[in-house]
Image: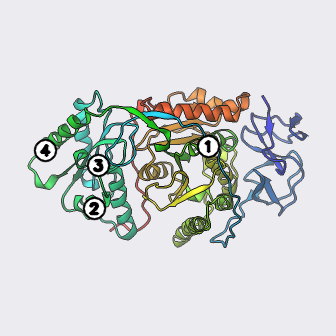
Amino acid sequence: MNKLVQITPKDMVAVALCPLKAGEAVSYGAGEVMPLSDIPMGHKVALRAIAKGEPVVKYGFPIGEATEDIPLGGHVHTHNIHTLLSGALEYEYHPTQPALEAREPAAFMGYPRKIGRPGIRNELWIIPTVGCVNDNAKALAQLAQKFVGGSVEGVYAFPHPYGCSQMGGDQDNTRQALANLATHPNAGGVLLLGLGCENSGIATILPRMGEYDPERVRTLICQDVEDEFEAGLALIEELAERMQKDVRVPCPASELVVGLKCGGSDGLSGITANPTIGVFSDMLGAMGGSTILTEVPEMFGAETILMDRCAYAALFDKTVHLINDFKAYFESYHMPVYENPSPGNKAGGITTLEDKALGCTQKSGSGPVKGVLKYAEKVENPGLNLLSAPGNDLVASTALALSGAQLVLFSTGRGTPFGCPVPTVKIASNSPLAEKKRNWIDFDAGRLLSGRSLDALGEELLQLVLAIAGGAQTRNEINGFHDLAIFKQGVTL
């Protein structure tokens, strides 16, 4: 196995693919370098002397500026680089017009819906409209486990702390989030559970759901009945009986919407896992399917790459607003736009937000950007879409589901066990993680470092996605992990 990789010929640094020892020369594509100190896996070593104040290049782009002179072979990390990011910027559109070659269609075994895309699961979801009835929803889900079986693949409650005491955009976000959840294709049946006195009650959610199949939705206001458990179970039984008629049938892969997310990243995420997801994104896009890239703060420093891939100028303008509006959100709270990476990211070898962003955007592949979405806006355009949401793992993954993703691909170099409302496929950037956390990880992209080709891994990931879409369970599903986190920005009354 190679020990060091220079990602592009322009790069001033190379990434350690395994721990390197001080004083032991290591070869890379264009030559060799002798580390001056021990270099942990995923961290960077200087391939030439870098002067103080000089931009440091990785992935072919600057990832920050040297804060001191860095010698050849020096460890390049947070102690000697700082970010070059700042607030809102002006951008110019330089379209690259990327194109994807058409690919032979594929299919998965899914559940067709009368309205909208097919589901890859046929689950019964209990959705509280306000946090006051969270425990009621969880208790109902527990009581309703007796209905699981056959075509009813699970009964889940999705508690959250919102639905009341919210203002402005937060209240709108909650209402639209719950409406989108209630019309998600993976839900074969939905019980909307309200209290009765909340701001975002059932009467405000239903109009936001648009056209939906009334056979699959029931509502219950707890204050209106004597026993909400008896009434709720009766409604759940009705839904379960209806769901037992559902069967999986072949569905075209063009009907798939797949969310793209990374978390607990390390220095190998942008070299193995994220590029593998990028190959998958291109493959699915070539078949007419859709992918969604989010984590806007983790686009800072790589945004121009995405902007130039926009299919037309109006999408470029939307992407500029996507970036600058999120920076303005940070600044409105007097927070720096570059308060990232996390401690775990840094321990794994990621130095600045630009470093993280350039690795993060590898998940988008090479295809054109076909859509730019507001939070809780559903995908309409096939191909790659950009979604406004933060970097927080559960908030961003939930946002992907709210925009219509039937499953989420989640790359990680550190490991994480959670699951969002839809199947959450964990893709390890390194094989030691995949081996150690077999109970968390679904796919080992670290095999790229052991000779497996990127195209072969992308194809393997595509086949895994089709299998999961057809009913194969992810580790988060096997572990019983399903969570919801709605994006909150403002005041709580």
Can I make out residue 23 in this image?
Answer: yes
Q: Position of residue 99 (x, y in %)?
A: 66, 51
Q: Where is residue 353 in the image (x, y as percent from the top left)?
A: 66, 56
Q: Position of residue 315 (x, y in %)?
A: 58, 64
Residue located 23% across and 51% down the image: 193
Mark nearest the camera among 1 and 3 is 1
Q: Which image quarter: residue 120?
A: top left
Mark nearest the camera among 2 and 3 is 2
Say which residue label 4 marks: 231
Say which residue label 1 marks: 102
Quadrant where the N terminus is found in the figure = top right
Give the alpha-carbon distance from disc 1 to disc 4, as whole Å.
51 Å
Q: Which mark is residue 127?
A: 3
Give the alpha-carbon distance from disc 3 to disc 4, as whole Å.
15 Å
Dot 4: few (<14), some (14–19), or many (≥20) neighbours within 10 Å? some
Q: Earlier in the sequence, mark 1 or mark 4?
A: 1
Dot 1: few (<14), some (14–19), or many (≥20) neighbours within 10 Å? few
Q: Where is residue 144 in the image (x, y as percent from the top left)?
A: 22, 35
